[in-house]
Amino acid sequence: MAKTFKIDGMDVSAADDQTILQVARERGIFIPTLCFLEGLSFVGACRLCIVEIEGNPTPVAACATYPQEGMEVYTNTERLQGYRRLILEMLFAEGNHVCAVCVVNGHCELQWLAEKLGMTYNTLDYLNRPKQVDASHYRFAVDHNRCVLCTRCVRVCDEIEGAHIWDVMGRGIDCKVITELNQPWGESVNCTSCGKCINVCPTGALFKKSKAVAEMEKDTHFLRYFSTIRAGGD
Amino acid sequence: MDMDELENIAAHEQAREAQYAHRVRVCVATGCLSVGAEAVQEALEHHATPKGKHHCLVMGVGCMGLCGNGPLVSVDPAGVMYEKVTPDDAPDIIDSLGAKPVARLQCDTNAPFFTRQVKIVNENSGIIDPEHIESYIAHGGYSALVKALTEMPPHDVITQVMDSGLRGRGGAGYPTGLKWSTVAKTPNTIKYVVCNGDEGDPGAFMDRNVMESDPHRVLEGMAIAAYAVGASYGYVYVRAEYPLAVARINKAIRQAEKMGLLGNNIFGTSFNFNVEVRLGAGAFVCGEETALMASIEGKRGTPRPRPPYPAESGLWGYPTLINNVETFANIPPIIRNGATWFASIGVGRSKGTKVFALSGKINNIGLIEVPMGISLRDIIYDIGGGIPDGRAFKAVQTGGPSGGCIPAEHLDVPVDYESLKALSSVMGSGGMIVMDDTSSMVDVARFFMEFCMSESCGKCIPCRVGTVQMYHLLSKFSNHQATQRDLDTLERLCDMVKYTSLCGLGQSAPNAVVSTLRFFREEYQERMIESEVAHG
C-alpha cells in the first residue's frame, strides 16, 4: 500500500518498493549519494545519504530505508551537514586524491560533492597510505589511490554484466577492490572488457588508458535501459 | 524416545554415578586445560584404579569458575574443592578420599566468590560431564524440550519466554520473547534458528564456557526456540578460535541425533530440528547478526543495513531467529521452572542472571554468574575479592570494545541494562576488566580503538576511516603530543562515528573514548602540549 509521509515538511507519497531516497529524487529534493547508483542494488555504505527521522536519535541511510506512514524526514539539517562534510574529509584523508593530475578532474563525483557540500579544507590528518596502480589490462587501469570503496564496480560487474570479476578483499582500512582472486586485471580470463565498471566508478580510480588529465568522462546511461528492461520483466 | 525413556536414562546414569563411593571432578574446560588439567585427570585416574572398581569415579567436567586458580578439582560427596592441582598432588587427593581433605590445596568454598553466585546458565557447569549426553539428562536435561513438545503449544512457549522477562544476553538486551514472537508471526514455511557463538570481546569467555561445559543446554534451548517459532533447521555459529567448544558442540549434536533428541520426529511428534555448526574465520564483526548470516551463507562477512531485520528476512531471505549462546542456555530452565520463577530473579526490566568474565587487576579471576541488579562493588570487592597488591581500584570496563569504563564513584550502580547504558557503557556480552591506579585510561581507550580499527570490516566510511583517525589521535595523547584541536577533533569524531556508522561495531566503537573522556578527562588534558599558542 502506498504511504504518505513528509520530507523537509513537504507532503510526499511512496509506493511500497520506494526508498526515502527515490521519493526525494522524484520530488526534486537533493540528498547527496556516493555508493548509491540508480540501477544497481544498494549497500548503504558511504553514509552520505543519511537523513534524520523525527523521534529517531540515529540518522538512517535514505538509499536503504523504506518510509513509513506519517514519518517526518529531514534531509539537510545542520547536524547532517556536519556529518557529511566529515565523511568527505575522511575520504580525502584516506586516499591520495590529487585533482590537479587526475583523469576525471572536473567530472568527478567526489570532487563535485566536496564543492557542493562546502568541504573546502580538511580538518583530519592525511593518512598518506601507499597504494598500488594496476595497468595490466590492455584498455583500462585501476588506481587504488583514488578508490573510495563504493563497490559500484563490484555490483555492476556482478548484477549487470554477470561476470563478477570484481570483489573486495581485506578489512578495515586495508580493504581494496580486486579483480579475480587478487590477480592482475590483465590476466583475468573472465573480464569481458565491457567497461561498465569504468563508467560507474565515481572517481578516477577506474579509467580508460587513453585519457589524460581531465579527459575521462563517465557515462552511466546504460543502466537506465537495464532498469527499464527489469521493470518490464517484473 | 519419550518421557519415560528419558527418565530411564536419567535414573540409569544417576545409579551409575551413585555406585561410586567418591566422585572426583576435574575441570577440563579451556582455562584449566591450559594449565595442565589433562595431566591432572590422567594422574588421578591412574592412582584411583588400584583402589578398587567402585571406590572413586574420576570425571572430566566443565568450568568451576575460579579460572585464575586452575586446575580445579572438586570432590563429592565431601564437598571439597582443590585449586592449583598438579599431577604430583594426585596420590594425596586419592588417599584423602573418605578422610581429611588435603589442606594445602583446599580452596574455601564458603568464600563470597562461591556463596554469592546464583547459577542458572552455569547450573551444570563443573558438575556434569559435557561429553556425555547421559550426564546432562541425569541432571534434568532435555526434560524442558519434552515438556514443550508434549504439553505446550508453540504460542505458550513464547508466552513463557515473554513473561520471564528474558532479554538478549549478547549485549543489546532486546526482549527475547518479542523476537521469538516476531519470527513466529512472520509467515513462511522455511525458517531458521541461529545461535551466535562468535564471542569476540577481549577478556570475555562466557559463551565459550557454556559450549564447553554444557553444550546440550544450548542445543535444547535452540530446539525449544525452533519449535516455538516454527523452524526446522538451525546453525550454531562458533568462532574457530574455540576448537574445544566446536568439538564439544559437534559431539553433542551427534549424541542428541543418535538418541532422537535432534533430527526428525523428535519425541515421536511431527517436530523436526536439524542443527549444523558453522565456523567463524576470525572476524569480530561476524558477531553482528547480519554479518554473521552473510558468513553462514558463504559470503564476505559484512553487515547490511537493517531493516529488514533477520526476523523478517534473514538467512537466504527466510525469517531467522538469532540469539546468543547464553540466551539459549537460559531457555530450558525457564520452560522447566516457569516464567514466574525466572522473573522473580533480578530487578526492574532486567531479569534473571548474567554471567561475567572477571579479569584484569582483580584477585579472583574467572567466571561468575550473578543476579541482575547486584552492584558493581559487590562483584568487584566481594565476589572478586578486591584489587591485588593493595592497590586502589580505578575503573572497570564492561561490554568489551562496545562498552565503557566505569569509575569508582559509580561502583554502587546496579548491574542492569539501563543503568550501565546511562554510564556510557553497556551490559555487553559480559566481559569485565578491572583496572587499578597504575592503568592509564588513555591507553585503555587506545587499546580498544586499535581493536575496533583492526576489526572494522571496511564497508562504511565512518567506521573504516573514523576508527583509524581516532586511533591516531589517541596515539598523540599517549605520546603527550596532543593539542586542544586534537581533543576537539576526537570528540567530533566520536559523535559522528557513533551516529553514522552502518552497524553496531562502528556505532559503539567510540564508547571507550566517550566514557573515559567523561570520567577521566583530566588524564587526556595532562597529556596535551601545555600551550598550543606557543607552537604557533
Image (cartoon, rainbow, N blue to C red):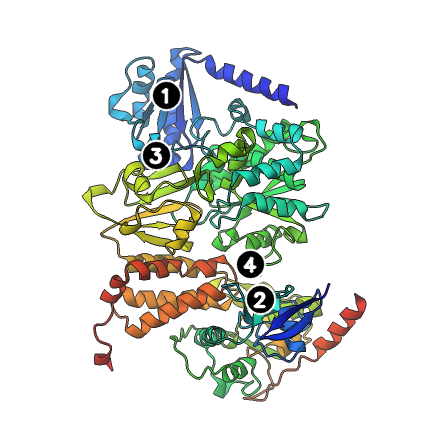
Q: Position of residue B334 (x, y in %)?
A: 53, 33
Distance from disc 1 to disc 3, alpha carbons, whole Å, reads 16 Å
Q: Quadrant of residue B273?
A: top right
- Please state the horizontal and vertical placement of residue B20, each as a whole percent of the image: 44, 13
Q: Are marks 3 and 2 in contact (CB under 8 Å)?
A: no
Q: Amino acid at mark 3?
A: Leu
Callout 4 crowding tier (Cα within 10 Å): few <14, some 14–19, many ≥20: many
User: Mark 2 sits on what residue?
Assistant: A44
Q: Residue placed at 66% from the left, 37% from the top?
A: B154
State the SS at label 4. Answer: loop
Badge 3 density bin: few <14, some 14–19, many ≥20, Cα 10 Å:
many
Q: Residue at x 41, y 53 (%)?
A: B421
Q: Earlier in the sequence, mark 1 or mark 3?
A: 3
Asked if badge 1 and badge 3 are on a common chain, one would say yes
Subunit ID for the residue under disc 3: B
Residue picked out by circle 3: B66
Badge 1 is on which residue?
Answer: B75
Relative to residue B413, is residue A173 drawn left or right? right
Instruction: Left or right? Give the position of A12 relative to A113.
Output: right
Picture coordinates of residue B521, whole percent (x, y): 28, 62
Q: Quick check: B342 above or below A20?
A: above
Which quadrant is the C terminus of chain B positioned in? bottom left
Q: Evaluate whether residue A189 shows in this view.
A: no
Q: Secondary structure at mark 2?
A: loop
Label 3 vs 4, first from the N-terminus: 3
Q: Amino acid at mark 4?
A: Pro
Cα–Cα gap, marks 3 and 4:
36 Å
Circle 4 sits on which residue? B303
Mark 2: give few (<14), some (14-19) or many (20+) Cα within 10 Å.
Answer: many
Same chain for the residues under marks 3 and 2 in the image: no
**SS assignment at label 1:** strand
